[in-house]
Image (cartoon, rainbow, N blue to C red):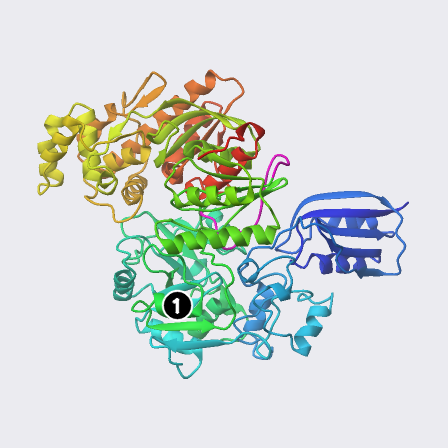
Amino acid sequence: MSGRLIRIRGLVQGVGFRPYVWRLARELGLAGWVRNDAAGVTIAVDGEKLPEFLARLPREIPPLARVDRIDAEPAEVVADGFAILDSAAGAAATAIGPDAATCPDCAAELCDPADRRWRYAFTTCTHCGPRFTVSRGIPYDRARTSLAGFPLCPRCAAEYADPADRRFHAETTCCPGCGPQLRLLDAQGAAVDGDPLAETLARLRAGRIVAIKGLGGYQLACDARNAAAVAELRRRKQREEKPFAVMALNAASLAAHARIGAGELELFESPAAPIVLCPKGAAELPGIAPGLAWLGVMRPASPLHLLLWHEAAGRPAGGAWLAEPAELLLVMTSANPHGEPLVAADAEAFERLDGIADAFLMHDRDIVVRCDDSVVRAGPAFVRRARGYVPVPIALAGDGPDVLALGGLLKNTVCVTRGGEAFLSQHVGGLDNAAAVGFLEETVDHLLAILDVRPAAVAHDLHPDFPSTHLALRLADAWGVPAVGTGHHHAHLAAICAERGVDRVVGLALDGVGLGPDGGAWGGELLDVDGARCTRLGHLSPLRLPGGDRAAREPWRMAVSALHAAGLAGRIPDWLRRTGPERDAGPLLAMLARDLRCPPTSSLGRWFDAAAGLLGLRAEARYEGQAAMELEGLAAAHGPVAPQPGGWRLAGGGLDLRPLVGALLDCPDAAYGAALFHATLAEALAEWALVAVDRRPGAKIAVGGGCAMNALLMAGLRQRLAAAGVDLLEAGLAPPNDGGLALGQAWIARRPESRVVAG
């Protein structure tokens, strides 16, 4: 038998893989067939140039395809020519692909006045366009997408049926004659005359705020160069200081505002088109990312976005303008009132964005699934994993039971495992209101539907009051399966184990706060993780929270707590005269002395707050992590310094940072103090972990949790461990913060030793 039967697994459906195989086989004069099946794609092929086919097959795949595995075996192939066969039946083991930004071929059509898709905002093909956000279920076909209500015209139908066309079986294929249409409405819902894109651009240039119906939800846009418009958007959205992202045509347009290195550029230009965090450039955009060293930048993610720049450029023909710097820069932020889920439906846009948007750029293609923009750093390191990456699976080390994990309270995501893969949902966000909990339930239903999974267990955080815990217990009871409670910090490190394919780590779990198995507020932990078993080896010297949760919002309170813990309370009056003469530490000191309303925490996040307070950075944090992010920015701007000698102690398995408090108090320069804090912390954490791993031969060191988002700290820690000959395991495919908790929970829950019903 000279032929081959080839089975390909990965992201190979809905991305033009079959026509790619068809074209390659025909080019080489081979005989056989290709078809989709439940697990991926199967090929039967034979001919003189079969070796060349086998060599080129994995190298020249379509841009959105991903090949995880190729298996081939000898086969007798009897065929006349090469054909694409109908799909084979079977249990689904494939997944819907993620949304992808406009490909070069579609961009060329948009800019060609002679093309029938000239300036058509819904131009797409097998190489680009929406998938996840328009899909209602599997198998992925037009009838199960929001394009079902738009029957193909004869010309589009001919493209769809032609294997030689890049729109062969592209389920979102359409054109101006048969597809969705744009419209611009004013704040009262009345149609605006004229070209919707031209009128939208005119309003943006006039300083107005426009709600734009994007791929996974509405976005609020304004002119990023107009400080008054940016300030007004902040006022209307109740987003006082949290950073905005900026959309630009290309990297050249951002040269003055962001330092885009090779790693950042690769992410920026990728089909996912995420928000990429870059070091700020010389020219600050007022009000965009106040007090931070980083600017979030992104390129147009869809033809609709791209056409705003085409309009601004004067509707040029051809593609040369796409590489030229463009003056237009737009703030592009999620359209949602403070703390609520992303707006996705047209009716809710008018209701929930009333008083925020001056106009609405809308269309009649429904958004099936809310999906926010992804946020990444070069590495890559996810801050938020969503549009462009979901639902791409994370490969696990082996098969196991199908599990649903519900995540935590903040930065919530959901995870479903199926066989040897884990599917992490899009960013759901904080579950602090009924609408957000409803979005969580929607996400669970949709993810289970598109994966065709019935979970054998449901995992959740140990905190009994989280809405995600409540939902997990309800679902487990309804399905008659175990509910598995998992430790918050165990799950942080387990997420790294899951994606790195290891069972045993000595891990630093570093975050703001999470409930420990002992009921305490953990957040600076040294843990020995061995599968579903987790042992606490030590923790950071605890700080007390004067006033409870209020201390997490007011860094000066944490500074008072740190000074009290370090035995330096006598220096508080002088420190306050320099940093906040209007504040009175007396009541806080009385609370600390009496241990009244001062719960202890081992949280590293609170030590960051204390350092920011000691250095006088700010009195109050306007959003989660602000003080720590500003401290990082100040340290990055200052540059490297040596760690503080004797700035920490290792005792009883724990790490004591109190010796550093006095050094920070005596720093005459806040930037130097910020750099000193980071350098000393990195050195201390490295020593702490190395001492522990020396006692456990063969264990690896991992770091997870929200504090692992600090690029400066992680670079310092990575460097110090590398000098000791130790590689650091970090999150790469999921966020290290609470956005990755569900992955860790699922990994723990599918291990046999974890099957304990919680709650």
Could you say where residue 57 lies in the image, as x and y percent from the top left?
73, 50
Identified by mark 1, the residue type is Ala
Name, please, the residue furthest toward the bottom. Answer: 193
Could you say where residue 486 lies in the image, as x and y percent from the top left?
46, 33
- On whether residue 391 falls in the magenta region, the answer is yes
Instruction: Tell which of 748 and 186 is nearer to you.
Output: 748
Does 528 appear above or below 157?
above
Could you say where residue 271 lies in the image, as x and y percent from the top left?
54, 56
Could you say where residue 303 lies in the image, as x and y percent from the top left?
51, 68
Q: Give the range drawn in magenta.
A: 384-401
Q: The C terminus lies in which quarter of the figure?
A: top left
At 24% from the left and 43% from the top, the residue drawn is 553
Does 355 appear above or below 546?
below
- Picture quadrant of residue 488: top left
Does 101 appear above or below 503?
below
Q: The N terminus lies in which quarter of the figure?
A: top right
- On whether residue 638 falls in the magenta region, the answer is no
Q: Give the residue at mark 1.
A: 349
- Viewer can see residue 733: no
Considering the numbered disc 1 on the image, is that residue within a helix, a strand or a loop? helix
- Picture quadrant of residue 348: bottom left
- Picture quadrant of residue 203: bottom left
How would you rate the neighbour count of disc 1 (Cα within 10 Å): few for under 14, some for 14-19, many for 20 or more? many
Does 353 appear above or below 470?
below
647 vs 742, left or right, is left
Instruction: Tell which of 556 and 259 is nearer to you.
Output: 556
At 39% from the left and 28% from the top, the residue drawn is 517
- Viewer can see residue 522: yes
242 vs 58, left or right, is left
Please, what is the dominant secondary structure of the magenta stretch? loop
Instruction: Tell which of 60 and 161 is nearer to you.
Output: 161
